[in-house]
Each structure stands twice: as structure tokens, then as C-alpha cells.
Image (cartoon, grey):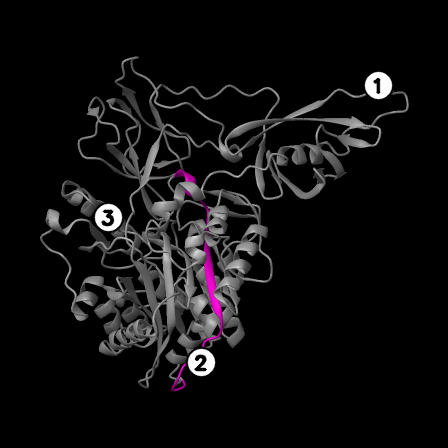
Amino acid sequence: MITSLLIANRGEIACRIARTCRDLGITTVAVHSDADAGALHTRVADTAVRLPGSAPADTYLRGDLIVKAALAAGADAVHPGYGFLSENAGFARAVQDAGLVWIGPPPEAIEAMASKTRAKQLMGVEPLTDVTEADLPVLVKAAAGGGGRGMRVVRRLADLDAELAAARAEAASAFGDGEVFVEPYLENGRHVEVQLLADTHGTVWALGTRDCSLQRRHQKVIEETPAPGLTDALTEELHTLAVRAARAVGYVGAGTVEFLVAGGRAHFLEMNTRLQVEHPVTEEVFGVDLVAGQIRVAEGHALDPEPPAPRGHAIEARLYAEDPAQDWAPQTGRLHRLAVPGSVRLDTGYTDGDDIGVHYDPMLAKVVAHAPTRAEAIRKLAAALARAVIHGPVTNRDLLVRSLRHEEFTEGRMDTGFYGRHLPALTPPAPDPHAPLAAALADAHGRSRFGGWRNVPSQPQIKRYAMNGEEHEVRYRHTRTGLAADGVTVVHADASLVILETDGVRRRYEVARYGDHVYAGPTALTALPRFPAPEADHAPGSLLAPMPGTVVRIAEGVTEGVTVEAGQPLLWLEAMKMQHRITAPAAGILTDLHVTPGQQVEVGALLAVVEADTPQGRGAVSDMRLPPRGREQPPRTRTDPTTQGTPCP
């Protein structure tokens, strides 16, 4: 009987495992890097053990340190969560060799399936070896791990070697294993998977299908169960193949078999020998706790002969700190407030006041809705996200709401090419023209009062805000009865609530301030000074870091003085477990290179200078615009997240 369990992970999944352990009466041990010293998962656990350092390779990927922590804390068992060492057979063996219970499949099953190359061979699918033009497009994919790390779609044969090198580097950084392989890339297929739970007594449950087709950078964004629109015959085929894969390797515990469905056929992708990020949708529909199931199976308990019957439909949206309109660039900073209506399930590793750093995945939370029908679940989730209070870095919240309400999604016609087709239409800013006025009125409340001697109307007061990268000026007046503005009726105004009426329609704005950052309802604004400070002086053609991160690589042959072409990769930044390619904005000469591999840079740091070769002379390629939310987002640097292509957890 397990009484104490170490969670070898961080963030949302560590908090979620700790919640189940509390329900089962099991004490928990958290591990944390220095960057995570105050993270939520360390606060919800009964005990926390430090792993010195901040980089994953020094902390969460150090199996020896984690086993040592488990023994020091007196844990009986280790749960790996997902990512990091969850699919590492060597770590599983080290846990067992230390006399601890491993909450996962046997190491032999991990070895057979965790390497995607060996899994495909087991299922009779061979990866490509000698790639020709006729094979294109192809996908370069990490053999270990998932989450889109180490993935590249290659459409030109000349790019293959460079993408293989980049994929190996990213896979080694994320999983400690740089093995990659190449497979055909199926355009616009649907990503469908089957959740499994197996015990040591020969029972294997197939817990329905999940559709994970809405993805960016090969990472899932919206998942649901059951997968819509599948025929009964195809569903049965998926279940049969998944169970066959599990039995072939003597699988035990929770796992997922993933497929691409195209042309009414199922193509085996991989088996993930761990819990999936999207497991809550299965839990909601089948009424099970998969983490509790994992623990009970590890204790030797038998599953019922048949799984519980499904009920209704569940959809999960992943809330990321990222800007979809800027190449999905990850965002960092203080999360001032995160509140989601209680009608939905919220799994998160953050709470109000936590900082979002550069070292780990930018996912803030998973929001899950369950309802009797798919249409009701979509409506419920979209409404909850729209009403959520999210104060802090830019997120993908608006994109999620628009995606859920898009007709392709509501009609169940989506595939893995959804964002490739629709992203521009889903990401334009939707400014509320009255939000700046609401912010100004809340700020003005109580600042000024008229004495009895004042008979003349007051002069308009002026305030300036940045909203969606543009400057907005608002004017209002103090009157004998309160605050007023032209064209709008001010129904109510105080420091935290403003109600405005236009054309007979009243709108409420709850206002919150965090320094110069102001939120009027869901709209983020930055209060601008009356007299703007002079802008930083950068040489024309300067490439500025669009995010904080680490310089992981300089492109071969890139040195000061070389001639570069427009769009040519110059260097790679790693932030939040993803590598971002920095490219030349125009043809010209690289006159300055200010960084070296391994160097940490802050947002706005000068990386390099390209003097553009133009008829007008050398110079910058784009103008500077107002940064959103007061943070510098330099448009002169072009980034390209280098994980584009196939679906993955």
C-alpha cells in the first residue's frame, strides 16, 4: 500500500497528481528547480525537495537526483507525470532498483514503445531512410518524448540536413535523447487517439477516442472525446489496434495510442507510455480518475472486466502564455489574476501573483467542459473562456474562443491544417473602443472635486493608452454630477467599476491596475506618460530579442562581415522549451553579432545588426510600433518557431 509518493514533474500535472493523492490519503513529495522554488506545485505538496539549477537538463531530467530525493523524503513510490523522464526506461529501472514503486508501465514496455522508431517497427511501419523528392513532404520527429519538440516538416530536400540537426538539438535538450527519424507527412489528416488503462491481471480498457486535431507547432490546443464523426467500424478498428499494441508489449497502467485518420483509414503514429496532457476529457466522459487508476494498478489491484460506460461529451482547451499573432511567441511576466467560471474544470500550475519564466512550457492551464452533447460542451467552454479573468502576459484566450466558435470546428470538420488555413482570420485584434475611456474614468474617480465657487465647466481631461499596439487618446470632463464624456453616458464610475451606455446599451467594465498596466474588462491597456520618454537608440537594421531566452546556436558560417539573404537563419533562441529561429529581415551585410551560444538574453536585447542593401541605402526594414501592454516587442526581428508539422501531445 502506497502511503507517500514523489511527483517527478512540475507545474499543472504535478498539482493534478497531488490532488488525487490527497483524495486517496497519500502524502506527496514535490521536486523543484531553483526557478520553481516558489511554484504552486511546491506549495500544494506536503514536502518539497530542491534540485539545484534551473535548466531541465540539470534538474527534472536528472533521474539520479530525483531517486535520491524520493529516498531522502521517505517516499514509497514515484509518479513521473508527462514529459521529462516519463518515458525513460532507465529512470523507471532506477526507481525500481531503489526499492520504490514505479507508477507506470514496465521498463520493457517503455523501451518497446517510447522510441517511436521501435514502436512503428513493432506495428509493421518502417520509417524513411533514403528520402527523395518523391517522398516530400516529410516529417522529422524525435524518437523520444513529444509535445512538438524535435519536430520539423521538410518540404524541400535541400533543407533536410539542417532540419535534422535542429531537431536533434531540440530533442536532446527536451528529453536527453537526440535520436530522430523521418516519416511521410500526411497533410490535413485528423489526429485521433485511444486512451488505455491496463492492469497486471490481463485486463486492458479502451476508454474511447479523442480528437486532437487543433494544433499549433505540433502541440495540441483543443482536444475532445469522443472524436466526432467517426464511423462505428473505424472506432472499433482504432480500439482493436490500440489494445493489440498494449498487449504486444505487456503494457500496464495508463497509456495512449495515437493515429492519423485520413481517407477513412487509420495510420499508426506512436504509443505514449504515460499519462497524456488531455486525459481530463476522458475522465469527464467516463467518470474515472486515471491517476487514481494508475496508482491502484501499481498496487496490484484488478480493473473491472469492462470499463465504465461513457456519458456525454468533453472538450479541453489549453491556455498558453503566447501570442498567436506573433508566430506563437511565448510570453513571460507576472500572472496577476487567473479566474475561470466554476462551471468548468480548471487544471493549472499557477495562481495569482506567480511569475511565468523562460525555462519551461508556456501552458498556464487546461480548461475542460463536460455536457450531454458536443454542441453544449462547445458553448459552455467558449463562454467560460470568454468570461475568464486573465491579467498578465498575452495569452491565446481569444484564439481559443474564436476557434471553438468557428464553423469548421462546430461542425466537426477540423483537421491538423486548421490553423494553417484560418490563423490570420482568427488572430486580428478585437479592440473595444470604449475600454480606454473606462480605464480613464476609473483612474479619475475621486481625483478631483469642485468647490462651491466653481461655476464654469471644466476643461477636458486627456489620457493616453496603448491598446493592441496602437495609441488611443481619451477625453473626459468633471461635472457637478460626476464624470462625463462626449457620445457616451457615464452611468456609474468608481475606481473598480465603470458602466457606460451607448445607443441604449449598457456595458460593464471591471477595472484593475497593476502599475502602468490596466484592464478594463478583458481589454489590456498600458497607461502612457503625458510626455513620452525618448526611445532607445538602436542602429538601423538592429535585430532585437523578441523574448527572453538562451542563444543555443549560431548558424554555420554566420560571422560579422558576411553577406546574408532575406530570411536566412542567423541564430536560434530557446525559450519555454522551444527553439525560435531568428532570420535576416533583408538582404545585406551582418555588421555586428552581439551574442554567443549559451548566452542568456532579455527581451529587447541587441542580437545582431544587418545593414540592408537597398536602393535608398542601408537601414532598418520596419518601423517601431507601440508595444502591447507596455512590453517591448521589437518588430525588426523575425522569428520562426522551428517546430512546424505533425501532431503530437
Instruction: Look at the picture and state if 161 lies above or below 627.
Output: below
User: Local crowd at mark 3 within 10 Å, few (<14), some, or many (≥20)?
Assistant: many
Which amino acid lies under the numbered mark 1 shown in the image of this protein?
A: Val
Q: How many marks?
A: 3
Q: Estimate the x, y position of residue 69 in percent, counting from the top left.
A: 39, 64
Q: Which mark is on residue 456? A: 1
Q: Estimate the x, y position of residue 162 in percent, counting from the top left.
A: 18, 42
Q: Which residues are magenta?
A: 304-326
Q: Is residue 517 visible?
A: yes
Q: Quadrant of the N terminus?
A: bottom left
User: Local crowd at mark 2 within 10 Å, few (<14), some, or many (≥20)?
Assistant: few
Quadrant assignment, res 114 = bottom left
Residue found 35% across the figure and 52% down from its top: 56
Mark 2 or 1 closer to N-term?
2
Q: Estimate the x, y position of residue 373 in percent, counting from the top left.
A: 50, 67
Q: 417 or 276: which is nearer to us?
A: 417
Q: Quadrant of the C terminus?
A: bottom left
Q: Secondary structure at mark 3?
A: strand
Residue at image mark 2 = 308
Residue at image mark 3 = 153
Residue found 70% across the figure and 42% down from its top: 505
Q: 6 or 117: which is nearer to us?
A: 117
Q: CA distance from mark 1 to mark 3?
A: 69 Å
Q: In the image, is 379 to the left or to the right of 637?
A: right
Q: In the image, is 542 to the left or to the right of 363?
A: left
